[in-house]
Every structure is written in structure tokens, then in C-alpha cells.
């Protein structure tokens, strides 16, 4: 138990949860430093989309929604702020008029996180951002990926572009950042332009679990499969919020109906206890399409689930 | 494979999905003609309701929401725009100040569709509209109905009126348009004024599956029952969007809680592959009650599910 | 069958459901009197919360949403307005600038209901209000509680205060109003400040069913457990709307993800047929956070479910 | 000063303005009787429109919005509830499936108001409703009209129909209910289908003040003109909420930009002090298009302005 | 009077304004051709912004909102569809992943409009789009500009980029497309990063009218100044919707308070009758920030005002 | 020119305005210290209201909305961040369950600001909060008040309570914190419970400018009157957002129609240049009633106007 007083959320008994500035979980906003075990970071980049933009406002929205989260996990009892020094290190720089330049800015920022040994948990931004993150997190060895998503994001090109939110994991494979045999994609569904994306994943050995598979197997078997595929190697979690059923995630660029629900998502992340986790992200939250606030609230809760398993992983490795 | 270039959606690689006018699935807006196999048609009639109006704006809303749909079904691989010539033939005429006149205008419009042999898929409008449609589609022989709905719509009269969104399927039975023994109603629930509507359906031999039944049987058994009841005769699909649980369909005149979800709906429509399908409709989408856009998105996805099974049916009959 | 014409909802055949003033279920607005069997009452108090206020507007919102409810239960056939004299007796007085004074005003109002022997069904208001209600309803003997909630509401103090929406059921136990061994809490989940609240419930013998338990047991077993715990003694139903999954209840002060759905809630209340029911409440509906109206609609439907079982209980006791 | 205690709004010091059922200004909901001087009445009819329906929900929305109104006019000091017995007499009957029948039901209801000598102030409903009202109010002698509106509503027919929200004042003229020379229309603007409607008004001698006129004259001169035109005869006020600039009235069927503002509207109604007022209405509030609630709030405030001048008129005539 | 039946809006007497697909003013959707006098075109480009994106959805939103517009101008009597052949020619191509490529696609599209001699009226898209348009429209001789805007859009660079929505009119000057002495900017206001943008305009001889100037001069004097500055040369109208006061235009990327209102905007455009108009645009409508629909409605009305003056200009030049 | 680099907003050229945490104007979040000249502070207290709560979320909402504000005033050229050290010092503590205790916590917090000589600019919170602030700011000598408001807030008691948002300025007078002869209230209007509040102000010598007065005098004369009344003594600005016309401020507890607009408000604050300003506040922003965000945006802009005049005042006094 570290329980470092410098790295605690604002005390709701003194400052109510509606009060003061919004940081992730009301943690201190700090610049990255060697004291930080887990760095919560916003990546407000949404220049990689071909339909509805808006995920640039995702980090701000999830910070606001995370006011409601408390200190202790209700099922596992994990108290992440006691286990690790967790801080909100702000957002990466971003140039809204320079797509490729922005990706470099993001990568440079993650280099600084990596340099001090902190584990990054990111809030996007669109689903292009795992690429610059993985270029840092996975530069020594390829990582396994647990990807929650309705779309495989393994096209070769989109609109003639090789880098965007539909090609991320193909590029990451090609660059040797991702070990496809330790990669599992969960929740695939939604009408498609063609067969190409899924075909790539199957070809390189990813484990693809469509919603049809998910339903046929049942959640427990899927959880078993996540465990089997990821094994004991370094593992990265990537959650595209459109992996959730649209009833839980209208506040995103391309909502897809007929997916898994929040309870499912929580249980699948929760099962990652004991894994060697090197980072994670939640992407594609677009708050202007979320008048009820539900999508933002879901993202904040999923971030807390991720934080709990990452904190245990990180604390265990101290 | 027809793959007629004149009947393809706008290419998202050239015109992004947010661009240009909204037609159903970004297909060409054409007047009805003999080249068309499947006619997508709006029926902006909502004078048959006794609570919240607004479904007159349903076709416009579903057109907008359908921008997001792509070309290929993710589970079956069906590519409807390759199998059949599909077009958006616009909306039926309608006179907002003349209820009975409007129903005649609708019927006349469907006569023109029928005359060229196209299969109509309609977006309402309130749930009165199957009556003028069936008067055309079923004029030679009664059809079986797969009705997704929270309400049976088999009252004798409502407010002294014999034609409205609560009497549709009783009138259609009485007029010999519907074969009650080949008719199945799925999802019945919601507080009721009295026992009359359901009693009629039971009396004439319809298969009624309440939500209690649905849950007791399980979805697979319900799918089996749909198959058994409809058999090999001509079958029409009618989807009142309030058949969905209210969490999926607040954007409607009378949302009802405790229903089936979108995955259920998709799977039940999907199971109609191989049936002899003569038409279908999605009714009661009222977009002014749908600030998240979820109901409209669900309707667009259900229309695509219907289109896939109808395209296979129609292509098989060429 | 009483079927007293003075205690019937407005007839939708004469006054459409969108017409005239909104009372609960369009029943007459009457002052409390000895003719009334079941008193529907609003308790617009929300001074007991530490995050988002707004439940003071809950009664008005649920009245509006209840326009859509009809006369007869679809599964059980119960027609509550035929069984009992049910009326909307308006809202309790409340002083928005005096928290403790308001609780006394509420208690006084319920004394008047109690004095004439009517069973109260209340719409809050925040989840502090069961305390003044139980001080009346349970003053002769402790009652069992069926509590639907994501939070146990059994803290000792919150912000130094002993009376608020997080301490209600602890105070009620300490005051001897509640029999903890006949009390069951269903749906507990959500990140926590610490272990204290749940520990209290376990210590005094309440039956706590977390969402993990709920899922492990299945709904039927939970229903059996509700039956077993409550037994044949006097029983009070308290439904904090945040017991529902956030997808069904964003319109509340502290929505919590990963809970049970409306179908679950309906079935659990429905199973209370035959119990000796002394009252019930639905709390924490905050309509300004409910742009789709879904939370309000759910509350109205749950109130109808409660009314049906309470009406049978009350009618049986005549 | 009557100050009859039976005809007072709920006392906000005892029942806060957010509490209890919503009636107009929190007045008692009473059936019409001879004790009532001014009858506030809802007319939930919207079958006369050719674009967006929804004004059937106008009375409910204005009742809710009117909770905020207090007792005394800030400029004139008028206290209408002290001068007259004012009550909310509910809504007229209406049959959503029978347009012409509904108009008769409305007329019959106003006959009952007229029979006891009460002055009716109505909340629509679409702008067809002045016709059945005037058939009662003006049956003995034609009345002058002060019409606030962006559209003249003096077409001969719309969609082949002679009775609807675009022909109201032409029919009323033809039926001898309206004295065109004592009629003034204020705020006319908005793109038009053709010249016909305005031409009729000019031909029969109505005073038409377009927004161009309004701006050229200035508000004070317009107020002078209202006074001159209406003179000392019986006068009826009809306020189509789309007379307001769209920035003040998006919650209506056909909002029109570039109109007068709320201050203007308040001042123009206020200037009717001393007139012989026989009734008034506010129409076309469609709350589902009003997410901010501003249109409903404006309607409630305009109703209070009307009430103040009508109460003085009525009290003066006792 | 041309009154070509091929170029008329749908007849509302046959197809109600809520029916069928949404094109600008319900005109036919046609590809560009020599028969077209005025081409209404969408430019769904929003890659030039540094704050809130979303104007890519502007054309779709304005098409929907334009359903409400009729045929004839209420003040001038202009009937543009009788004077000229007006058509909706759809949207320019656009590549959401290629900013500079998209600008070329836009320019190429306008070349095709220009080649047939049609006058383009565009709906953006962000305020970068006048640049590729002017490169076509003004390639023979520089044009005067009437710019309604809260921001001058004459920075040299933004975020290191020379082409974006804040540099448009500086680039256009430098490229010789705009005659600064025949250019007037109206409505400038809003907090600023620094003095540079306005300084450029003043230096090159543009007429800058800040809101302080506007108020000091009065609208009539401003209208006189527009007339004086633009003179008799070719003139282009560019309306950034944020030129309107934020109360009229929240649905935009950067709303600015304290501006002119819709009546002002209408009158200033209306005063351009008799000018030699070579095109116009309305930019920066971002519908996801416009829950009331007011901004979209304003844009549709302003487009109609522009259309009326352009139609007179074009008809006069036949 | 101080231009202290530690007290500058985030540079939008490096961190876009949508990025990173939301503080007032993207300034650093610092604890109060002697280096700070002007302290921006949130006061999330809304326990003093008798209708709609929600202003507790005002500070968070205004922080988010203030992202859009830049560095330099467009009319005066004032660059407040160059003149003074300005910082966001967070929110005061607040106990949502203890009204009187919270007011003490607020007062204590302002004592700390006062102790270091910083000028406080506050964002409420309801309009009770000027009382604890003035108890600090005005403890040495009474201050003049420029109050923008639709309500006078000078009742003696409300609901039996002496401290709440309707009695603030009466208490402040009685406590000798306010010099009534140097106090001016602007914008008074809205229906009233009775004559008492205004009578108090008149009796003690406040200058009351109702909307009737405002319109009769014209804005320039009102500005002159503000200058005359406040003179050269210490002056405090208090802006209840409901002072704005409801078209500009629906996002508040009690919106009032028929008020002044944002341009008016800006100009009246702007005229306070040269005054001896000791603090200011903007109260009653309730973001859950503000779906367009306009009210929040207006508040952020008004805060910037206040900051500019206060910065000049403070800089001049160095």
C-alpha cells in the first residue's frame, strides 16, 4: 500500500463531487514525472475519421463524467489510488490542422510517459491513436491486444490513406508492434463495405469474436478465450466505445446496434486481473452526440475498471 | 449477380457518408419503374394515432440515419445492392388534412409499385399504413404476417373510428388480406385498456407471443415458431418500432418498456431467409422524441436486415 | 369489485391521454379521505443529496409520464382501479430552505394518510424520504423492506449529517422501523467510498444481493429469495430508480452502470402478489437529466406495477 | 376586490412552485360554473396543420411552464387573482381521429363557458381553434381581433380543405364572427406560397402590419394603431406563438425568423388595458420542438399578460 | 419569367413539406448542366477549423431545414423559381482524410459549375471554402466581398498552416481574387488572440464594421456603406453563420455573443438587390450543436434571401 | 505590463482550446497566494433557492464554456492576462447537506483571498453567495453594488428563512456591507409575489431600474446612471444571469422574459472602466437547463468583460 497523499482524488467530504475543476477521477493534474505509476492522459485527436468527428472533445467529457466515480471497486475491493500513484497528466499536444504532425506530437508525448516508467491509460480521440501509443509502448517487444470494438480496424487503406481510424491495427501488426496471435477482437458486427478487414485479421492469426460468436459462446467462454489468447505476455487494452451496443453508446462517431452491454464490458475488463498490462485506451467518445451523458458515463466507468486491473498489475510489479 | 451500376449507393470513397442528399442507404432517388426489384418508399402518414403524432417525419429521419449503413451484411454476407435493383422511390402523396383521402393516395401509390412487380419496403408513418399496403400486396391471396409490436392492433374501433393504428390487423383480417393462421405477433405487452384486442387475434387463430411467452420460450424457440407459422406462403413483415424495448425506441408515439432488444430483433428478421417475402414496413418512428437518434438508427438497421432477406427472396425468384 | 366511478382515470375515449391536467394515471386529484384505499402522493424533497439535485421535480415528471398508462395489467389482468379506490392526493408540503423541517412536514402528511387507513404509494424526491414515511407506516411494528437500489444507503453519516439519502435504511433500522432480517437489497453495485455501508447491512442481517450475486443466481432465484426473506409480515417496497442500469435511468442524481433492466424490475415487483404490502415508493427521478423521457416513463411503469400488487393486497384485506 | 379564497393559486410558501399538479398558474382545477369570471382552458387540437403537428401537447406544456408565474404584474401592479375568480377548467374534449367532430366538441365546450358568462382564455392547439371559439364568443355580434402572427391565416383553402389553421380568419369573416375593420394582424412575414391570403385581408379592410411595417412605424405607433383599430367594441386576442421571432419560439409547428421579441409582445398585450375583451388564445406551442423550454415559458408569460388585461376588463364590467 | 416546370420545388399541395427527400427548398436534385442558372451546392468540408468540427454536416442540415421555405419573398415579392432555373446539384466530393486534396476536389467541382455559366450558392462546410470557390468565381477579375462574420478571417497563419478557416480572405487577397477596396466585413467582435487579423484588412483597404461600429452607425447607414463599397462590380456574398448573435447561432463551431440579429441579416442581404452577384455561401453551420434547430432554420432563411437577390441579378443579366 | 509567464492561459497554438482540463479561461489552477492579483473562484452553492436547483454545477459549466475565450478584448484592447496575475483558484468548500455551514465555509475561503489582497471574481452558485463574499470584501467599508438582475433579492424572508437567494441584498444592507445610495439594480421585471422587495430598495435609497425604466431611458442613459450612482467609492458587481432576457438565459433557476440582451450586458459592464472595483460575481447558471450551452457561453463572456475592467482597476492600483 502506497497511499501517497499527493496522489489522491479530492476528498468528497470536503469538496463535493460537483465542485472544482474536472480531472480524471478528481485526481491531481500533474505533469509527468518519475513518481507517477499510472498516467491518465487525454488524446484529443479526431482527424482520422471518415464520418462524424467530435472525439477531440472526448477527454474533456470523460473527465467531467468521472466526477461520479469513487475510490473502491465494488466487486474486487481494489482501491487503485491506494495501490499506485495515479495522476491526470493532461492532454497530449495536437494540431487540428496537421494530421500527421499531430500523430508525431502524440507519440512524442507518450515517449515522455514511457521514459519514466509510467503505464499510460488514455482517453481518445478517435481509434487512430493506439498507433502512436503502441509505437512507444510496444517498441521493445510486440504486445497482445484486447480490442473491444464493432469494427476490426484492419483495412489496408481508407480514402487512399494508410493511417486513420480504420487501419490502426493492420499498421500496428505490419510495424511489428502487435503480436496478432496474442490479439483478440471482441464484438465485431455492423454492416460492412466488404470482407477485407476481417480477412486480414484471420490471415495473421488474430482471434476474432463477432457478436454471433459472442452470443454462441457466452460471456464466460469469451472471458476464457481472452485469457488463453493473451497469456502471460505484455498486453494492451483498446476499447472503442462503439464496441458497446448503440443503446449504451450513441455518443460516438459510428454507433453500431446489436452489441454487448456495459455489464459485459465491465466483466471482460475485470477478468484481466493478473495480466501483465502495459497500457490501455478508451476511444471514440463524441459528447455532442450524447445528450443524456450515458456514453461519457460508460467511458468513465470503463476507465475505472481498466485502472483497477492496471493498478493491480503495476503494484504487483513494484 | 445483377450488380447494376445504376442501382448502387453513393460510393463512400468518393462522396463521404455525411455528404449529399439523404436517401435510403444513399441509393438513387428514382421514380418507380419496371427495372426496380425492391422499392424503398416512405409513407409519411400519422393521422391514425390517438396519442403522440410525429411519425409523418419518420421517412426523413430514417433516410438520414441510413447514411451510416454500408453494403454487406456482417453475418450472412448478403450484399443486397448486388442481388437486386434497389431504389428509393420517394414518399407516397399524403394530405395532412384528409385522413381517409390519404389512405387512398397511399393505396394508389402502392398499386403503381405492384404493377411493375417490385417488392415494397416501407418506412412509416404510423401503424395504420399496413392496411392500404396490404390492400395492394395481398389482393390476390391473403398473406401471412410477421408482426413485431407491443400492441396487437386488433381493436374493433378506437374513438369510434374503424380505421386507425389500433385496428389495422383486424380490418386486414376482415378484408381477407391476412391469413390469421399464418400470422404471428411478437412482443405483446404494455398496460391495456381491456382484453378485446388480444381476444380477437386468439379467436381468429393468430399466434400471439407476449413478452412473457417470449422470455419463457427463448429467442430460438420463437424463431422456430415464426418459421412454423409462416410456412411457405407469401409473407409480409410489419415492424412497429415500439415492439423494441423502450430503451431502444423512445422516439415513437407510445414507447413500451420491458420488450426485446435490437439483437433479438435483428436475429428474428434474419431468420426469414428463404421465406417468400412480399413486402415489409417499419412504422411509428417519431424523430422529435429521439434526441439521441437511437430510434432512427435502429430503424435504419432493421430496414437493412429486412432488405437483405427480401433481396435474397426476390433474387431467388428471378 | 368496487369500481367506484369517482375513482377512475379520465376516459381516454373522451379525453385523449395528452389532454387535461396530469395526475398520476389521470386519476382524480383529491384530498386524503377515508374513502381512499390507495393514496398516490408526491414527495418533492431533494435536500438529502450530495451530488446532483433535481428529484424535487420527480413527482411532476412522473405524473406527466403516467398519461400513457392504461387500466389493466397485461400479464396478470389486474385492474387496480376496479379493485380499490385510488386517488392522486397531491404532494406533501416541503420547504426548500429547511431540510429538517421538510422531513417533519412530510411525516405529518403521511400521518394523515395513515389515519384514514390508506396505503401510500409515493414518488420522490430523493431516497431520504422513506425515513419519514416509515416513521408513520412502521410505527406499530417494524416492516420488511424490498429495496431496489445500486447503493445500500446504510452509511452512518454523510458529510457529518445523520439524515440524508445515503443513511436512510441505517437510521430506519436503528429506530426500529425496519426488520433487517425481513429486508432485502437488490442491485448493489457502483464504485464505493469504502466498505462501511454494506458492512452494516450484513451485520444486522439484511439480505444483500449485489449485481454479481444477481447474475450468479439468476432472476428466478432472486425472486424466490425476495419471497423467502419478506415472508408474510408487513412489507414496504422502496425503489431507487438508480437500481436500474444507467441505460434505463440516466435521469437521476447518481446513475450507475451495469444493473438490472426494466423487464427484471417489472418481474421482481410482480412477484410481490400476495404479500402484505403497507406502502411503496419510487425515488430519485430527476427529469432535467432525462431528455429522452425514458427514466420518467420507467418510473411511471414501475409505479403501475407496484399499484397492481398493492391493490390486490389491499383488496384482499378488505 | 373579490379575493375569493377558493380561486387562489397554491401558496408558494406552503407548496413550492415545483410541487403538486400543474394547472394554469397553479390555480384550482374546477369544472365550469357560474362563479368563475375567467376560465382558463386547454384546447388540445392539432389536426388542422399541414406541416409539424404537436400543439395537442401545448396545454400540458404551458401548464407546467406557468408554475413559475407569481401573483402580481410587475409594471401595472394588477393582481388578477384578486380581481376575478379565475380557474383552470381543464381541456376541451377532442377526438384525435375526427377533425370535424373535434371542432364541434370544442364549440360545445365553449358554449358551456359562454352560458355562465365567463371569459375564456385558451391555450391551443393549432390556430384552427379560434374558429369554434369565435362561433360561440362572437355569435351575438362580430368582434374585433388583435392577431399576433407571422401568417395571415386567411387562405381560402389549404389542401382542398376549407377549415384548418391557414383559413381560420377568412372563415370567421365569412361567417360574420369577425369585424374586419376592427381587426389588426401584427407581425406578418415569412416566405409565402402566393399573394392570396394577405390580399383577402386587405380587401375586407383588415389592418395588416407586416414586420416591415412594424419596424418602420416603431412599437409605440403600432400600439396606437391597435388602439385605433379595435376601438371600444368587443375584442378578442389571438396569439399564434409563431408571431414571435423564431429565437423566442422554436417550439412551434412553423417557426418564422425576423419577428418581434417577447418585450414587444408583452407591451402590445399590456396596451389592451381598458379594452372590452371577450376572450383570447395562445396557439401553436409544440413542446417536443422546445428542448430549452423557452417557447413554453414565453406562452405562460403571455397568458399572464392577457389574464391581467382581461381581469381588469372583466372586473370593470361587474 | 421562365417558370420552367422542370425546376420547381415539390408542390406542397401534393407532397407535404415533411415528405420525400430533403433537397434545398425541395428543388430537384440534378447534376450540373447548361440549363441551370443558379446551382445550390453543399460543400461538406470542415478540416480547416481549430476548435469544434461539425460543419461537414451543414449541407444535410440546411437541406432538412429548408423544407419550410415557400416560393415567394414576403417583402419584395420575388419568386426566384419563376425567374431562374434553380437546382440542387448535390455536394462537392470531399476526402475527410486529406485536407489539401479536398480543397482541390472542391475547386474542380466549382470549375464545372462555372463552365456552364451557373451562379453558385453554397452551403458549407467551414469558412475555408470561399477560397477554392473564389479561385473559380474570381479567376478572371477580382471580386468584391460582402462578408458577414464575427471574425475577420485574415490571419496570416493558424497553427503554422496557411490555409484554414481563419486565413481565407487574406489568402484570397494575396491571390488577387478579392478586391479589398470593394470588400466589407460586418459584425466583427469577440475576444481575440491579437491585433493581426484586423490590421491586415485595414492595411489593404477593406471596410471593417465592428459591432461597435454597427451600433454607432445604425443598420441603415451600414446598408448604405455596403452599397457604396461594393459598387457596380462583381460581388460575392459570404455569410459565416457566427456573424449572427449567438442567441441565433449556437449551432456553429465558435459562437460569438453580442452580434446582429436575423432581421438585421435579412435586411442587409435584401439590400443587395440590383448588385452584380457572382455567388454566395453560408458557412459554419454545425447541427450537432443546434438541438433546437434554430441555427439551421436561420441558415435556410438566409439562403433564401440570397437566392432572391441572386435570381434577380441573374435574371436581369439574361 | 506584468505579463508573468506563470499566469498565462494555455497557448492555443500548442494545446488546442478543446484540449486538457477546463479551468477559467484555461488559466493555471493554483491555490491562493500573494502573487495572485485576481482570483477566479467557483462557489458551487445552490441551497438558497426555492424553485429549480442546479447552480451548484455552474462553476464547472462556465469553466468548460470559457475555453473559447481568447486573450484580448475586441473593443478596448485590454489584455487582462498581461496586466495582472490571474489564476483559477478552484472552488470554495461546500457541504450540500448544511446550508448555513456552507455559507461559513464560503466566507472563510474568501477571507483567505482577501488576506493576500487579491480581487475575487466568482462564479456561483445561487444568488445567496454575494452575502458571504460581501462579509469579507466589504468588512472595512460598505461597497456600492452594480446588480444586474430581474429580481431585486431584497425580501425580508422567504419560506421563513432570512438567508437565501431572495434576501441577499437586504441582509447585506442591514449588515452595513452595502451602501444603498451607491447601489443600482438593473433589469427588474417578472411577475411578483408582492410589492415588498422593491419597496425596501426604494426606501433605503437604492437606484432601481426596471425594464420599463431601462427602455424609457435607453442604454446610454442607464450607463450614465450607473456611473453617477457608483461614483468613486469601492464597487462590487453582481450579475444574476436571469438579468438577461430568457432568450439568452434559459439555463437558470428562474428565467424571466423581456429583459436586456447580451450586447446590453457587455456594454454596461464595459462602462465600469475606471471604477474602483473590489470584486464581482456571476450567479445562477444552471447548466442542466441549458442544452444549447448558450447560457454558459454568455456567463463566460460576461466573466471576461468583468475581468477586463477589474484587471484595469487592479493594475491601476498597483
Image (cartoon, coloured by chain):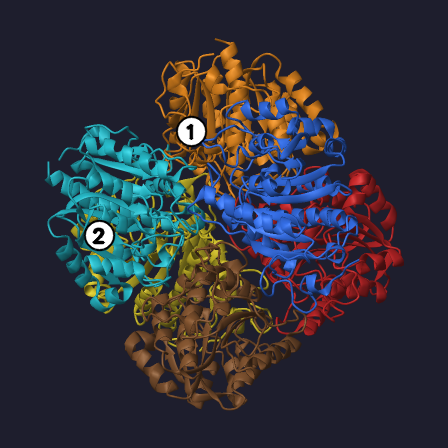
Chain colours: A blue, B orange, C red, D yellow, E cyan, F brown
Where does the image place residue C273, in percent across and percent down from the top left?
79, 44
User: Label 2 to label 1, Cα distance in Å?
Assistant: 35 Å
Q: Nearer the viewer, residue E118 or E101?
A: E101
Q: Chain of mark 1?
A: B
Q: Nearer the viewer, residue B43 or C212?
A: C212
For the C terminus of chain F, the quadrant is: bottom left
Where does the image place residue C112, in percent across and percent down from the top left?
72, 67
Q: Examine the rendered structure and indicate whether residue F8 appears above or below residue E303.
A: below
Element class at badge 1 = loop
Where does the image place residue B123, in percent across and percent down from the top left?
47, 30
Asked whether residue D118 is in view, the answer is no
Q: Is residue C140 left or right of residue A244?
A: right
Q: Examine the rendered structure and indicate whether residue D52 appears above or below residue F158.
A: above
Q: Nearer the viewer, mark 2 or mark 1?
A: 1
Q: Examine the rendered structure and indicate whether residue D201 appears above or below residue D39.
A: above
Q: Are the numbered discs 2 and 1 placed on the same chain, yes or no?
A: no
| Residue placed under numbered mark 2 in the picture | E146
| Residue placed under numbered mark 1 in the picture | B13
**Mark 1 packing: few (<14 Cα in 10 Å), some, or many (20+)?**
some
Asked whether residue F223 is in view, the answer is yes
Q: Chain of mark 2?
A: E
For the N terminus of chain F, the quadrant is: bottom left
Q: Nearer the viewer, residue F103 or A45?
A: A45
Displayed quadrant of residue F304: bottom left
Q: Nearer the viewer, residue C213 or F313?
A: F313
Q: Is residue E239 left or right of residue A134?
A: left
Where does the image place residue D317, in percent across and percent down from the top left?
35, 72
Element class at badge 2 = strand
Amino acid at each position: 500500500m502506497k497511499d501517497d497523499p499527493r496522489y489522491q482524488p479530492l476528498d468528497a467530504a470536503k469538496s463535493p463531487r460537483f465542485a472544482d475543476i474536472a480531472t480524471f477521477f478528481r485526481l491531481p493534474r500533474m505533469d509527468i514525472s518519475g513518481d507517477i505509476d499510472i498516467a491518465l492522459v487525454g488524446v484529443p485527436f479526431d482527424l482520422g475519421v471518415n464520418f462524424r468527428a467530435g472525439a477531440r472533445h472526448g477527454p474533456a467529457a470523460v473527465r467531467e463524467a468521472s466526477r461520479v466515480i469513487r475510490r473502491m471497486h465494488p466487486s474486487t475491493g481494489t482501491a487503485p489510488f491506494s495501490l499506485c500513484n495515479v495522476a491526470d497528466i493532461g492532454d497530449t499536444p495536437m494540431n487540428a490542422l496537421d494530421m500527421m504532425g499531430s500523430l508525431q506530437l502524440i507519440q512524442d508525448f507518450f515517449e515522455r510517459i514511457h521514459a519514466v516508467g509510467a503505464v499510460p491509460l488514455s482517453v481518445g480521440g478517435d481509434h487512430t491513436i493506439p498507433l502512436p501509443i503502441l509505437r512507444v509502448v510496444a517498441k521493445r517487444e510486440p504486445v497482445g491486444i484486447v480490442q473491444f470494438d464493432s469494427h476490426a480496424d484492419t483495412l489496408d487503406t481508407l480514402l487512399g490513406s494508410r493511417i486513420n481510424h480504420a487501419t490502426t491495427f493492420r499498421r500496428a501488426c505490419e510495424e511489428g508492434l502487435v503480436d496478432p496471435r496474442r490479439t483478440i477482437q471482441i464484438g465485431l458486427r455492423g454492416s460492412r463495405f466488404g470482407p477485407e478487414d476481417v480477412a486480414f485479421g484471420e490471415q495473421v492469426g488474430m482471434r476474432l469474436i463477432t457478436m454471433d460468436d459472442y452470443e454462441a459462446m457466452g460471456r464466460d467462454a469469451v472471458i476464457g478465450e481472452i485469457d488463453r489468447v493473451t497469456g502471460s505476455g505484455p498486453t494492451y487494452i483498446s476499447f472503442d466505445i462503439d464496441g458497446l451496443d448503440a443503446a449504451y453508446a450513441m455518443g460516438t462517431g459510428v454507433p453500431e446496434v446489436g452489441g454487448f452491454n456495459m455489464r459485459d464490458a465491465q466483466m471482460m475488463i475485470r477478468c484481466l486481473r493478473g495480466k501483465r498490462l502495459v497500457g490501455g485506451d478508451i476511444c471514440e467518445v463524441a459528447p455532442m452526440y450524447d445528450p443524456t451523458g450515458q456514453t461519457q458515463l460508460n467511458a468513465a466507468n470503463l476507465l475505472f475498471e481498466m485502472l483497477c486491473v492496471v493498478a493491480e498489475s503495476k503494484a504487483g510489479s513494484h
